Image (spheres, rainbow, N blue to C red):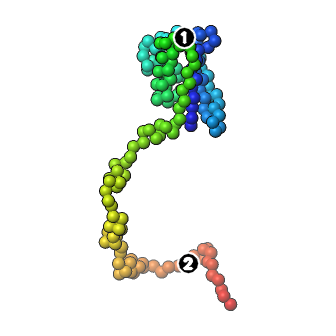
Amino acid sequence: MKQKYLILKNEEKTRLVIREYAELDKEIFSLLCEEAFDDEVVKSAIEKGKNALIATLRTQNLFPIGIYAEEIAAAVTKMYESSDDQPVELFFDDTDLLIKDKKKSPILDDLENEDVEIDGLLDDEDISEPSFDEKNDDIKKITSPLKISDDDPVNIDDED
């Protein structure tokens, strides 16, 4: 899912506003949530550190994952340190997270680096199948006669 966060100051410049959007339709972002924070609360959280700021910005309605929360906190910190009141847009795509952290399996690396003969892997010697005599021994161990229950339907096609 693609997400966008718009970070801005309100018109009176006394509150920080964060709007969360998500791409619910192709290339159309819909507003999911808007949260406002007092300037003094945000400034205090910035002074306490990144984790305190993230904890302050996360609410019951606005709770971005850790990686996104860190980037949002960095943007807020930069906004307050530079006294720049220009809105900041952050774009995130969840598929980037999946691709970025994906690592190749060591087994696949070994197979790619070695010449493996498929024919050698499929030799008949590796497969142990019971012999004909061993199969017949199992049949000989059956001591009771086989009966067909009267309740079981039997499909017999009589040809005349």
Say which amino acid is labelled 1: Asp
Identify the element where label 2 is drawn.
Answer: loop
Please identify, in this view, whether the residue under mark 2 or under mark 1 is nearer the observer: 1
Q: Residue furthest right?
A: 160
Separation of marks 2 and 1 at Cα, in angstroms: 84 Å
Q: Residue furthest bottom?
A: 160
Q: Quick one: quadrant of the N terminus?
A: top right
Where is residue 152? Give x, y as percent.
60, 74
User: x, y (%) of residue 107?
Assistant: 34, 52
Residue at the image position 49 percent from the left and 12 percent from the top: 82
In the image, residue 130 lies at what x, y percent? 35, 75
According to the picture, the residue beneath numbered tag 2 turns out to be 148
Q: Is residue 92 above or below residue 83?
A: below
Residue 65 in the image: above or below residue 141: above
Within 10 Å of disc 1 (Cα), the crowding (few <14, some 14-19, many 20+) is some
Which residue is at 65% across, 37% downward?
A: 25
- Mark 1: secondary structure: helix
The tally of labels here is 2
Could you say which disc has been placed on residue 39 in the image?
Answer: 1
Q: Is residue 106 above or below residue 125?
A: above
> 37 or 71: which is nearer to us?
71
> Which of the 4 image quadrants contains residue 51?
top left
Left or right of 116, for residue 159: right
Question: Which residue occupies 53% across, 13% down?
Answer: 84
- Which one is nearer the viewer's eye here, 144 or 119? 119
Q: Mark 2: give few (<14), some (14-19) or many (20+) Cα within 10 Å.
A: few
Name the mark on residue 100.
Answer: none
| Front residue (pair 21, 57) | 21
Do the residues bearing badges 2 and 1 touch, measured as CB atoms within 8 Å?
Answer: no
